Amino acid sequence: MVARLVIAAPSSGAGKTTVATGLMAAFAGRGLAVSPHKVGPDYIDPGYHALATGRPGRNLDAYMCGTGLIAPLFEHGARGCDLAVVEGVMGLYDGAADQGELASTAQVSKLLRAPVVLVVDASSQSRSVAALVHGFASWDPEVRIGGVILNKVATDRHEHLLREALGESGVPVLGVLRRAPAVATPSRHLGLVPVAERQAAAVEAVAAQAEQVRAGCDMEALLALARSAPDLRTEAWSPETAGRPQAGGPVLPARPAPRVAVAGGAAFTFSYAEHAELLTAAGAEVVAFDPLRDEALPEGTSGLVIGGGFPEMYGGELSANEPLRKAVAALAATGAPVAAECAGLLYLARSLDGSPMCGVLDADARMSERLTLGYRDAVAVNDSVLAPAGARMRGHEFHRTVIEPGAGALAAWGLRQPERRVEGFVQGGVHASYVHTHWAGAPEVAARFVERCAGGPVA
């Protein structure tokens, strides 16, 4: 059994990431093996979690992966650890739009049978905090709120008033944190600035968060609460068994492992840890490369995965790396499998904000004032290296860019909400789309992609 806590809040902006990351780092500093997790699709917070713990930050998304996989994925990530800290998303009871509790922090806490610590921004209230906490604690009797951490408390007098009010609520105060500029993490158009773009500053911020939590929280009480979580009694998810062909299916002949190059570095920071694990389990050799620095693809590349990130922040540098842009275009021209999501889509375009990109797609991308955000129900419109036509997947869009046209002659996905439309590009071996997917929810995607790569090196 892994001791575990869910860090939640009444709303976004209360300080969940600061508290969760600080707790992870503080417990890791005590010599505990800490497993970091994040509710929802967000890629950025897990980067800070990984920095705090030295382990991959993993997402628990009930919409994209299904409720039945939440506990198994948790057990997979937390195997061998002393403690797991799960950072929530938005407000405690907020989830997928028009889907009830689906994908909410509350739902995940119930699926994990984990106690919740509520982080409350107390900066503009005193006695009212008790009514707020009481409401959240009583709303769903299946959600166990084991304590509260008061954030942004102004003075000793303010703390006294808050503690006095909460003394009548029945929910213990497990920490009080003052305002502290040193723990702040800068944000921009899609949230926090990723760790990969500010490594030294991020290390300092995480250290400051750990110190703030150690000084302001009852660490022993928090650890005791985490250890009160019951056994999950579930089998851990495994990338080896998840992508295995069903019994009675064809037995594939042994072949050399195809080399799959995966984009990384500061411009392409969005990736779920399970993707690389599934590719490896399907028989691929996964090799990372950095489009900002590397002028060639890894030798022997048979397939290419370009995930999400912030190419709009590095358009000039990506464009200046002409040798790599030509290498990517040449690989795609051979029909080799190329899977590109969001940032990868932009990189494959003809241009981004006027700067030349790889030119694989006859399309141009640019920054936009409009934020596109939300879960997506998708169906494959055409056969591709990721899915056969008609296959259904769930995903997520999150960007402030547009690409014109929005879909190629052969589109990637048909989407059902918020409006019906087709989007993305299927072109030879290329599958490029704005939609982020989590392959743990559809492990056959990785198996299909590697199978398409298995004909041997083409670059």
Image (spheres, grey):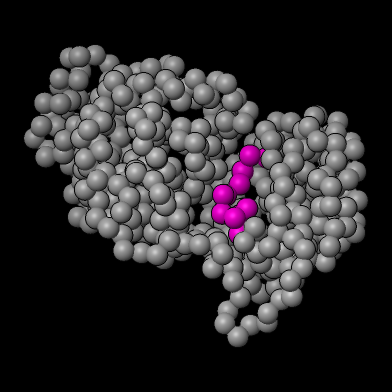
Q: Tell me where residue 1 appears, x and y as whole percent.
A: 30, 54
Q: Tell me where residue 60 appears, x and y as whole percent.
A: 45, 52
Position of residue 65 relative to residue 117, above or below, is below
Q: Tell me where residue 97 appears, x and y as whole percent.
A: 45, 55
Q: Tell me where residue 246 appears, x and y as whole percent.
A: 58, 79
Residue 128 lies in the magenta stretch? no
Residue located at (31% from left, 60% from top): 232
Q: Quarter-wise, where is residue 13 in the image?
A: top left
Position of residue 279 relative to residue 127, above or below, is below
Residue located at (88% from left, 57% from top): 458
Position of residue 220 relative to residue 56, above or below, is above
Residue located at (81% from left, 45% from top): 298
Identify the magenta region.
268-278
Left or right? Give the position of 252 relative to 359: left
Q: Quarter-wise, where is residue 43 in the image?
A: top right
Most foreground residue, 221 or 299: 299
Give the mark count. 0
Res 409 seen here: no
Most foreground residue, 20 or 120: 20
Res 443 seen here: yes
Most foreground residue, 66 or 123: 66
Residue 277 lies in the magenta stretch? yes
Left or right? Give the position of 83 relative to 440: left
